[in-house]
Amino acid sequence: WINYEQGDVDLMDTRTLKLRHFFKNTPRDVGKNKIRNGLAVAQDHLKNYWIMAYNRDGVYITDESLKLLKFYTHKQLLPDVPDSYIMGIAAYKKLIVLVTNKALIFMDSSRQIIKKVPYSFDNNLQFEREKISEDNSPTVLANGDILIPDEQYVVFYSAAAESFSVIKMPPLDYHIFHPRIKVNNGKVLYAYGSSLYEWEKDRFRLWAGNTGKEKHKVVSLLLDRSGVLWAGTDGYGLFQYDMRLKRMPKYDYKYIFHKDITERLGVGIDKINSSFLGRIHSYHWRWAKSPDGTIWMSRASDSLTAFPNICSVKDGVLTNGKWTYTNSKVAEPGINSIASSASGKIWGINHNYCLVSFDIKNQKLTLSKPVINEASNIVNQVNGLVIDEEHIFWISSPFGLTRYDSRTGKSTNLKSSLPGAHPLTLRQDPLKKEILWIGSNASGLIRFDKVTLTATHYTTRDGLPNNTIYGIIPDNQGNLWCSSNKGIFSFNPATGAVRSYTTRDGLPV
């Protein structure tokens, strides 16, 4: 269907490319200037098309041959809904859904009203007939739920509860037609201003495919057969989004990174703010997970404090006790890294390279002597800690990689095994006990063999998006997820396969 500005309608067969003027055998004034633009066309299960009139006072209905067009006024269609006009139209299974200013109407192909659901919200601001440029045609989800757009609002109808709720979208300087489309797996994308939103259960969230660079307003959407989404704009050309790409879901911060993470673990924001977590920046937040599932957190800093900033979270409960040192009566720097031994004992290492032993039951900490005897004038020196069994400690810092044996008290600097490398993070290989992974500053991802004391560098020549690696987290399949100066990437140690994620996948600029 091709709808022209002046109201004419053509019908094109895309297989034969034959174009037929729809009103060739119909009086010109039947459809002239009266057919709606936008989504206001629906096809019922008998192949009849229902087309909403421009001034909302009725519907045009074709027959199966697409040769006859008949106009039905809103009074003819809705005799039991006085003073109503038709604001939107859609098809759902064997029914036609009509959005009116009074109620949601479900009608069969013979124009019989099957169900009428009066609105339960204050619709004084919704569905104004005078807004000729707006189209309130609904989007019906697979479960029968319905989304009805109206400028800054979206009305949500829950089929199960037979109830309505009104969702307020962010303000815009002006409103144009807001297109929406069903994409993969029945998901609905809603174009609002310059952004695409995805419907999720009972709310909209920013779609992960947004690049963050869009300045245009999207006025039309089309998903082609290859899986590419085309977005037409208000004068800024066409944009493409490849729907076949796996994108990361994006969640806007409510507070700040470490607070949002802790809240997602089940801790209330009041409890979070009452702990030291409420007073620090995410840059100083450190964490580790013990074998029993407890998440341990600390504040990494060279700032001195008499009471260590330590807390733990398990099963949604945050424990924020008053920790003290057993062998120090002076203020000490923050704990820069935390790790768990094979037995589940928790250790840390502070800014001065002192190992910290945790007595969880009594909330006591015991400091060792510095295990690295270097000039301590580099900010945030220690950045990684891995423990083998109960006595071997692997420590990464700007000085390289250090192996410390607590039984003998011997420290071995392995900087010569990592020529030119400036470690930024350290992680145990999830499948191979003898392997460590090191993220470095400009030297790539480093595989270190604890037995042979040899290192293998993976860089951009091997497919990495960038050679600076800030963080490494292994998943259950043995893949390493790494953050870099060019987004996030996953690395498969067995195959060397790299999968990069950037702004195209929902990451911020």
Image (cartoon, rainbow, N blue to C red):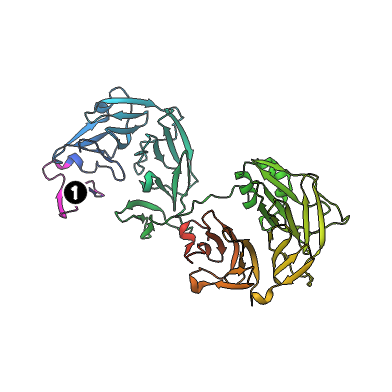
Asked if residue 30 shows in the view, the reply is yes
Asked if residue 177 shows in the view, the reply is no
- In this view, the residue farthest toward the right is 329
Camera-side residue of 433 and 3: 433
Camera-side residue of 255 and 409: 409
Camera-side residue of 400 and 112: 400
Q: Position of residue 174 (x, y in %)?
A: 44, 48
Question: Which residue is painted at 17% across and 53% down in the image?
Answer: 15
Q: Is residue 221 magenta?
A: no
Q: Is residue 6 magenta?
A: yes
- In this view, the residue farthest toward the left is 25
Three-letter residue code for mark 1: Asp
Crowding at mark 1 (Cα within 10 Å: few <14, some 14-19, many 20+): some
Q: Position of residue 357 (x, y in %)?
A: 78, 54
The residue range painted magenta reads: 5-28
The image shows a total of numbered marks equal to: 1
Question: Which residue is painted at 70% across and 46% down in the image?
Answer: 312
Q: Is residue 251 left or right of residue 356?
A: left
Q: Quadrant of residue 471?
A: bottom right
Q: Position of residue 440 (x, y in %)?
A: 61, 69
Q: Quadrant of residue 318?
A: top right
Q: Does residue 489 sit above or below 312 in this rendering?
A: below
Q: Does residue 15 sit above or below 450 in this rendering?
A: above
Q: Does residue 215 sit above or below 69 in this rendering?
A: below
Camera-side residue of 103 and 369: 369
For disc 1, the marked residue is 10
Q: Secondary structure at mark 1?
A: strand
Q: Is residue 92 left or right of residue 484?
A: left
Q: Position of residue 321 (x, y in %)?
A: 77, 44
Q: Does residue 457 sit above or below 233 in this rendering?
A: below
